Image (cartoon, helix red, strand yellow):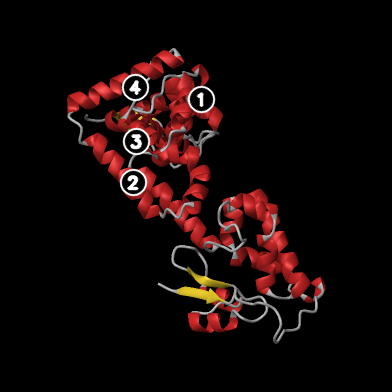
Amino acid sequence: MVTVYRKDDLTGIELEGTGLKLDDMLANGYTTDKSEAVALSTTAGGSNFTGGGETTDSTPIKEEDLSPYSREQAKVLLPYITKLDPVRGEKLIDSYTQGFIDTGKAEFALANMRSTVEYSEMFEGIKRNDGSLRMTEAQYLQNKEAVAIHLQEYDLGGYAKENLDVIFPKLLANNVSPDELRNRVKAVSDTITSLPEEQKAQVLGQYSQYYSDELGETVDMSESALVALAIDPEVNAQILSKRLNVSQISATFERVTGEDIDYNAVQRLVSGGITSQRAASEFETATARAMTASRLARRFGRAKTEYSALEFAEMGAAPDTEFAEQIGTLAAQAESESAVQIGAKKTQQGAVSGLTEA
């Protein structure tokens, strides 16, 4: 595992899993020798620079003197910026590029990017009260992803999707690492899991009754929802506003199907009767049917050749007559072709010329 350092980044970046290339990092002032970075950190632009002493030429360079691909080079160096948030990410790339145009120095370009409002919004909590960084951007994203993965381990994917951007900065502020959070969630989950079945059923029943009465509709509380309630009191309001259920179904859909889904589509599924308890099996079926329909549509040369799991999930929740007819026609054509292949002989052009032995 390779870690690189720079005079303004003594924490270092572990390159594995970031998509960053060692050659690109070295070309932008990073080194694999931490002692070298520490030694340079007392010079201008370094983490430990206090002013005075030897300075370097900081005469601004003209934009036309730079490579015409400098903006694209910034995207290569910071690939996670635009992937994380395409709109604000582009503004950060602009700030980084402008900082390099003004100074000709990568460390000042990075400082210029980190001073923007968009940066504070995208990397909330990365800075301490004194303005110093708790970690690098790559480490921030690695830790945030680790928190999401740990929550998913305990069937809290919906909770993570709804709350990750809020709870992660709080974890940073309180110096709670992803592993520490996992230990806390595990402790709560183990406590609930270890309850005698009768007692557990009674607790779940009481919560289900409470929320059913409050919402005026049937609510079936799950063990994972109890875990979420135990680790975050704000979940109570989310359940009452139905956001947690929507987020849970959304997370399950994306995990099972590999497709994205927006809030309105999830609302349609919920309105159609999809629950978090049976969402996984429903979406697995929808995915399989979409793959089969797409394959048949391509085979038969249909105008529409790609079907999505969402289309089939929505058809199951709220039947669409026109869509159902499309799929019915495909199924009938497939069944007809299968019957011909088994019980008749075809010419090269596909015409049935006579029966064969079944």
**Lower position in the chain sequence, tag 2 or tag 3:** 2
Kindly tell me whether residue 133 is visible in this rendering: yes
**Lower position in the chain sequence, tag 3 or tag 1:** 3
Marks 4 and 3, how far apart at CA: 12 Å
* SS label for mark 3: helix
Q: Nearer the viewer, mark 3 or mark 1?
A: 3
The residue at which mark 3 appears reads as: 227
The residue at which mark 1 appears reads as: 267
Q: Nearer the viewer, mark 1 or mark 4?
A: 4
The amino acid marked with disc number 3 is Val
* SS label for mark 1: helix
Marks 1 and 2, how far apart at CA: 32 Å
Q: Quadrant of the N terminus?
A: bottom left
The amino acid marked with disc number 1 is Gln
Pick the front one: 301 or 40: 40
**Lower position in the chain sequence, tag 1 or tag 4:** 4
The residue at which mark 4 appears reads as: 207
Task: Examine the rendered structure and indicate whether residue 158 appears above or below residue 122.
Answer: above
The residue at which mark 2 appears reads as: 184
**Residue 234 pos. (x, y %):** 47, 33
* SS label for mark 4: helix
**Residue 104 pos. (x, y %):** 73, 75
Residue 213 left/right relative to 52: left
**Residue 259 pos. (x, y %):** 47, 40
Q: Residue at x 52, y 67 (%)?
A: 20
Marks 2 and 4, how far apart at CA: 22 Å
